[in-house]
Image (cartoon, rainbow, N blue to C red):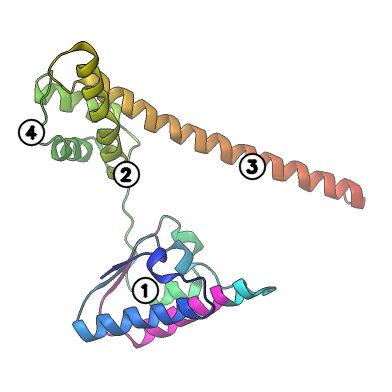
Amino acid sequence: MSLGIAELESKFMGETAKNIQAAFEQARDTGALLFFDEADTLLGKRLSSVTQGVDNEVNAMRSTLLIELERFEGIVVFATNFAKNYDEAFRSRIGYHIEFSLPDLEARRRLWDRFLVSGIPLKEGRETLLDCVSSRSEGLSGREIRTCMRLALPKAFLAAERDSEDPLLHSDHLLAAIDEVLASHEQVATSNKSNKAHSAQETARAKALLGIQ
């Protein structure tokens, strides 16, 4: 059973915890493996300072998940990009922590080979194209490589329509898509640096107002 926060979360108080209980009950009845995708919200630290109803709801959700994990005798898999933000109570209940690093050159080549299905007409030789895009896509995950394909294919069709030619996918389309995805990495990194700098400035200003050295 594959579940994400969208399937579990409810706008009604108490319903999210009930949805978690129901998921475990269904897995128990059917013998299914439970897979929680993008589980960052579920596995985060419980809130110590509760000021509003939504905080209570978050704590109830996480406490319910802890209880169900203790009771469940089957297999549960969590996928998260922020393992360091686990609540320690979850860390001790999860038997194995497996890190998946970004694909190396060989792995990227296999991914490109998989996504470049045989029905796609190519301008260059397949092996030459695979060598080119595998080398250029360092730092991309498998999902981002698939995104590159989704960005590149429309470019090939639009170019063919513009030039009144049969559509052919070639390296320029794929390299442009790779650059587009890599550029998004830089934008995120720049945004994070800007936010940190802004926070530091706000902290310094607050200290100055309070007379703190």
The amino acid beneath tag 1 is Ile
First in sequence: mark 4 vs mark 3: 4
Distance CA(mark 1)–CA(mark 4) = 43 Å
Asked if the magenta segment contains residue 126, the reply would be no
Q: Secondary structure at mark 2?
A: loop
x 44%, y 74%: residue: 90
Q: Nearer the viewer, mark 4 or mark 2?
A: 4
**Seen in the image, is 106 located left or right of residue 212?**
left
List the residue tagged with mark 4: 119
List the residue tagged with mark 2: 102
Q: Which mark is residue 94?
A: 1
Residue 32: percent from left, percent from top: 21, 77
Q: Nearer the viewer, mark 4 or mark 3?
A: 4
Distance CA(mark 4)–CA(mark 3) = 45 Å
Farthest residue toward the top? 163
Tell me: residue 167, above or below residue 199. Answer: above
List the residue tagged with mark 3: 195
First in sequence: mark 4 vs mark 2: 2
Which residue range is magenta in the image? 57-80
- The dominant secondary structure in magenta is helix
Distance CA(mark 4)–CA(mark 2) = 28 Å
